[in-house]
Amino acid sequence: MIRIVKLNKSFNGKPVLQNISVTFEPGKTNLIIGRSGSGKTVLLKSIVGLHEIDSGEIWYENTLFNKLDFIGKKRIRSEMGMLFQGSALFDSLTVEQNVMFPLDMFSDKTPDEKLERVNFCLNRVDIHDANALFPSELSGGMKKRVAIARAIALNPKYLFCDEPNSGLDPITAILIDALIKELTEEYSMTTIINTHDMNSVMEIGEKIVFISEGVKCWEGNKNEILNSDCDSLNDFVFANSLAKKLRASNK
Amino acid sequence: MQTGFKNQFNRNTINISNFGMPNYRRMIKFLTQFGRYFLLLKKVFSKPEKPSLYFKQTFRELVYLGVNSIGIIAIISFFMGAVITLQTAYNTENPIYPKYLIGLGCRDSIILEFSSTVAALILAGKVGSNIASEIGTMRVTEQIDAMEIMGVNSASYLILPKIVATILFNPILTLIGIIVGIFGGWIAGTLSGVITSENFIYGIQYAFIPYYIVYSLIKTLFFAFIITSISAFQGYYVDGGSLEVGQASTKAVVFSSVVILLFNVILTQLLLS
């Protein structure tokens, strides 16, 4: 479980996140949604410690993460996996080497055991016969799946995904969503996903937090989101013409 | 009357502080960057997570940054040696000067300045821009963030092997530069007929001081560290996109070159005085 208490973050005196308090539960796909520039990525990067926060608390189970030193953070980080918006695969390494990287760094397994784990993770995300390829030789969807394989290589307790569907076609996007949901349930991970894709929200949104202009405006699940009283959320949810027609037909 | 004086005083105060502000800010910015550079070095030289992986990475960098630079150093050294020989010959046509001075001039110019300082400036262009753009691209494509999330000390993993590799290999490049440069001078001198082979060989052996080679190698070690650490610093703190990576690459070459020239003066004074 990850608990955020009264988190504030600003850049050059300009507030980006204000007084955010939320709890993300394990075994569930927790979504942070909002318009571009609303502060989703800053919130996610603050939670994982890539941004220093101005004030507030970030709890991983019973550990206050934001007050830990480098060694303490490193211990928690060994339980984290993260999928970046642009996949962030290491260009100079092959697919196999990318997935093996965290194992090389932090596990004491033998080379054969590491290779077995790499192949297991790649099979789990449906990547076959691509061990020797470089990231530049992969499609966008394949890159995302390899990045997921790398993120789960060390059996993380926490999985963070920053816009996992950006730049993907709708079918591949649904496959990636389904894969993240399956892995979350299979390993009982606390998964936090940043997205502005309403398909993802309606498919896997077990817990949804809506952020607008750095402020948490709404919290609920995919069943409650269509009937909310929050105007800024309704503007976001019913932004496209298909959703507007759907709402009109329901009324 | 008193209020008028107060206003006049305040106006003057504001004017004075405004006048000094840009310099003050520039100084603060410079000191901040200076501090960040040393904080990065502290991170770079912290204990590695897995020394065996760093060892492998160092070998990879030895090839990328060292072995791949042999060609450019050899070509430039050859032609510089040739030009130094021809210029010395055309400027010492007076019969008072013995011919072997051409060989001696070529040898000392190559050993004292060219093989270390000029070669370092060339490497600042080749290796420095390579390091800044590689690390800068990793920063803007979030590859460094990905390492940090895994708990890897990205600064140490990415920069330390480069520093070790250049410190180990640049002295070899210096020695190659000396040998090829003097060889280039001999070829140019004998083929153009400005000096005989015997005179040139006598000149390069005449009054030889072995310490000059040690001096050159010591300078090379400092320059290798300067090129790698400054370029890595520029790349590591890139913020933005491809435009900023390009700017970081340019800054890496410019700052490395300026610091090399500054240290050239300091080291020459310390080592040869």
Image (cartoon, coloured by chain):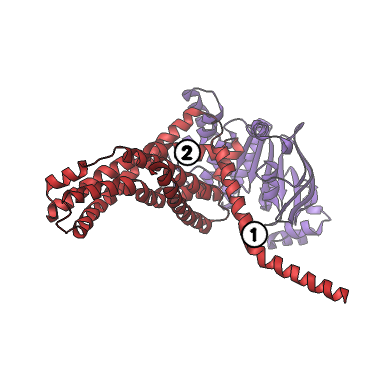
Looking at the image, residue B100 lies above or below residue A81: below
**Residue A24 appears in the rendering:** no
Q: Secondary structure at mark 2?
A: helix
Question: What's the colour of chain B in the image?
Answer: red
Rendering quarter of residue B62: top left
Q: Which residue is mark 2?
A: A95
Instruction: Tell me the residue at 60%/35% (across/down).
Output: B151
Between marks 2 and 1, how big is the CA–CA gap?
A: 46 Å
Crowd band around label 1 with a 10 angstrom C-alpha radius: few (<14), some (14–19), many (20+): few
Asked if disc 2 and disc 1 are in contact, CB closer than 8 Å, the reply is no
Q: Residue at x 67, y 68 (%)?
A: B19
Residue B153 x %, y %:
57, 36
Per the rendering, the mark at residue B25 is 1
In this rendering, position of residue A232 left or right of residue A12: right
Residue at the (48%, 57%) spot, across then down: B246
Q: Quadrant of the N terminus of chain B?
A: bottom right
Residue kind at label 2, given as amino acid type: Val
Q: What quarter of the picture does the C terminus of chain B occupy?
A: top left
Q: Is residue B45 visible?
A: yes
Q: Chain of mark 1?
A: B
User: Image quarter for residue B65?
Assistant: top left
Left or right of A49 in this view: B124: left
State whether residue B77 is above or below residue A119.
Answer: below
Residue A236 or residue B15, whichever sits in front: B15
Q: Are marks 2 and 1 on the same chain?
A: no
Three-letter amino acid code at the position of disc 1? Arg
| Colour displayed for chain A in the image of the structure | purple
Left or right, A111 with respect to B114, comes to right
The picture places residue B136, in percent across and down from the top left corner, at 51, 50
Mark sitting on residue A56: none
